[in-house]
Amino acid sequence: MNDQDDAQLKALLKKHFDPVATEPIPARMYLRRPAWIGYARAAMLVSVGIAVGLAIPYVRPAAPPIAAVQPAATFPMRAARAHLVYAPEVRHPVEVDASQQEHLVKWLSKRLGVDLKVPLLAGEGYELLGGRLLPGPEGPVAQFMYQDSAGKRLTLYVSRPNRADTLSAFRYAQEGPVSVFYWIDRECGYALSGELDRATLTRVATAVYRQLEP
Amino acid sequence: MDYDLIVTYIPNLRRYARALVGDRDGADDLVQDTLERAVRKFHLWRPGDLRAWLFSIMHNVFVNQLKARKVSSDVEVDETFAAPMSSVGPLDLQDLQRALGTLAPEQREVVLLIALEDMSYADVSRALGIPMGTVMSRLSRGRERLRRVMNAEGPKSGLKVVT
């Protein structure tokens, strides 16, 4: 009996007051947001923005770095590119040819600021064609070119070590079609490049290494 | 940031306030004051029952208003009720409001929150900041009084509020 009374009372109250809930809400009740809400919202958006910005490198670790930020091409990469540019050259593969070998070595040694030695690779089937001076990321670079009896060419890329280059033992790298053996010591970095199979290049590179690193 | 959430409860607050205060303007003033206070104190709201939080603010505002109008609210409820209810036709809104007006404000709050908002005893306890036992006793005394008042006029108006 009492529960029924309560339900009836409730129904009566709802019947009379529910329409209030559907009355149009007076405009004054849509309060202007107090200033702090605006500031808080702005501050939150800024902090979210900063957080997102900070998080992006972690969220997308695989994203390629922007070109401008990317450090200069690695040493073997530069060597391989130089090889690709000059090795196919028919009429001007070198600036100074092997007939002026002494001058070539003096000239390049002077420009690089280090006493260069030119390895002799005749024993491996490669004759010196000559050499040229190239721009490197932090200064001049020397390139010596060799050619075998079939016209296949090798280049030896020699530069003073750059700040970005770390000392390296005898290493192998493949840059596109070009195989590169390279090593970097305190004096110079050397890279022997050629479109050769790895075994052949290893053999020649070993000979170069032996002559240059007594 | 969830300020818009408050807006969604305006209809609830207005319905309750209308029944609690009686007149439309007074009720909307109560809602207005409640909203302004809620916005000012919104940073204190911990995610949870926003409705209970808003009604607790309204309760505080309401109590403050009662204190401010101490004199007028001291006009005893029974005397107010001395005014005759409409003698013809079903119980109208005015009759109901007058009957509600005979309740002590704290009884009215409990009765209305449970009837209009379907609040549980626990919700009411939180909103009004009173123990559950107090909620129940105020509810039963409030309902009883409300029934008695309406029944007193009931037979005359031919209304069968309580069977």
Image: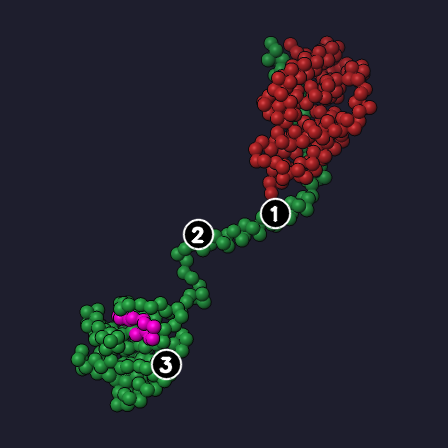
Chain colours: A green, B red
A176 lies above or below B125: below
C-alpha distance separating marks 2 and 1? 25 Å
Q: What amino acid is at disc 1?
A: Arg
Q: Secondary structure at mark 3?
A: helix
Tell me the chain of label 3.
A
Whether the magenta-drawn stretch holds residue B111 is answered as no
C-alpha distance separating marks 3 and 1? 60 Å
The disc placed on residue A113 is none
* Sequence-earlier tag: 2 or 1: 1
Q: Main secondary structure of the magenta part?
A: strand
The residue tagged 3 is A112
Q: Secondary structure at mark 1?
A: helix
Q: Which residues are magenta?
A: A178-190
Instruction: Tell me if label 3 and label 1 are in contact, CB under 8 Å.
Output: no
Q: Percent position (x, y) of residue B106?
A: 70, 21
Q: Looking at the image, is mark 3 or mark 2 nearer the viewer?
A: 3
Q: Percent position (x, y) of residue A110?
A: 36, 84
Q: Percent position (x, y) of residue A178?
A: 27, 71
The disc placed on residue A41 is 1
Viewer-proximal residue among A20 and A123: A123
Q: Residue at x 45, y 67 (%)?
A: A68
Viewer-proximal residue among A91 and A105: A105
Tell me the chain of label 2.
A
